[in-house]
Amino acid sequence: MLRVSNLDRSIAFYVGLLGMTLVRKEEYPEGRFTLAFVGYGNEDQYPAIELTHN
């Protein structure tokens, strides 16, 4: 898990520069945070990095 200050820029870095894909994105308005998971493939077969923004 990596805590990020700008989720859109962080996703752009991992997807654009490193060639990962945005696997899924989950918003939790009641908890006031968003999780984005990026990786090189399906989470069933490949590890993913969790980006946390709050």
Image (cartoon, rainbow, N blue to C red):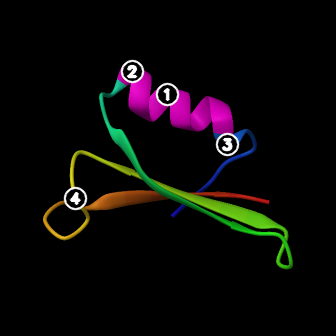
Identify the residue at horizontal 76%, vertical 65% (top origin): 33
Residue occupied by mark 3: 7
* First reached walking from the N terminus: tag 4 or tag 1: 1
Along the horizontal axis of the image, is 39 left or right of 4?
left
The crowd level at tag 4 (other Cα within 10 Å; few <14, some 14-19, many 20+) is few
Q: Residue furthest bottom?
A: 30
Along the horizontal axis of the image, is 17 left or right of 47?
right
Disc 1 element: helix
Instruction: Look at label 2 and name its amino acid.
Output: Leu
The crowd level at tag 2 (other Cα within 10 Å; few <14, some 14-19, many 20+) is few
As drawn, the label of residue 17 is 2
Instruction: Look at label 3 and name its amino acid.
Output: Leu
Disc 3 element: helix
Q: Quadrant of residue 3?
A: bottom right
Q: Considering the whole magenta stretch, tell me its main secondary structure.
A: helix
Identify the residue at horizontal 41%, vertical 31% (top origin): 15
Q: Residue furthest top?
A: 17
Q: Quadrant of residue 20?
A: top left
* First reached walking from the N terminus: tag 2 or tag 4: 2
In the rendered image, residue 18, in percent from the top left (x then y), is placed at: 33, 28
Measured in 3D between alpha carbons, the distance from the residue under mark 4 to the one under mark 3, in whole angstroms, is 21 Å
Instruction: Tell me whether the residue at label 3 lies in contact with that at label 2, contact meaning CB atoms closer than 8 angstroms.
Output: no
Disc 4 element: loop
* First reached walking from the N terminus: tag 3 or tag 2: 3
Magenta part of the protein: which range?
A: 8-17
* First reached walking from the N terminus: tag 4 or tag 3: 3
Instruction: Tell me whether the residue at label 2 lies in contact with that at label 1, contact meaning CB atoms closer than 8 angstroms.
Output: yes
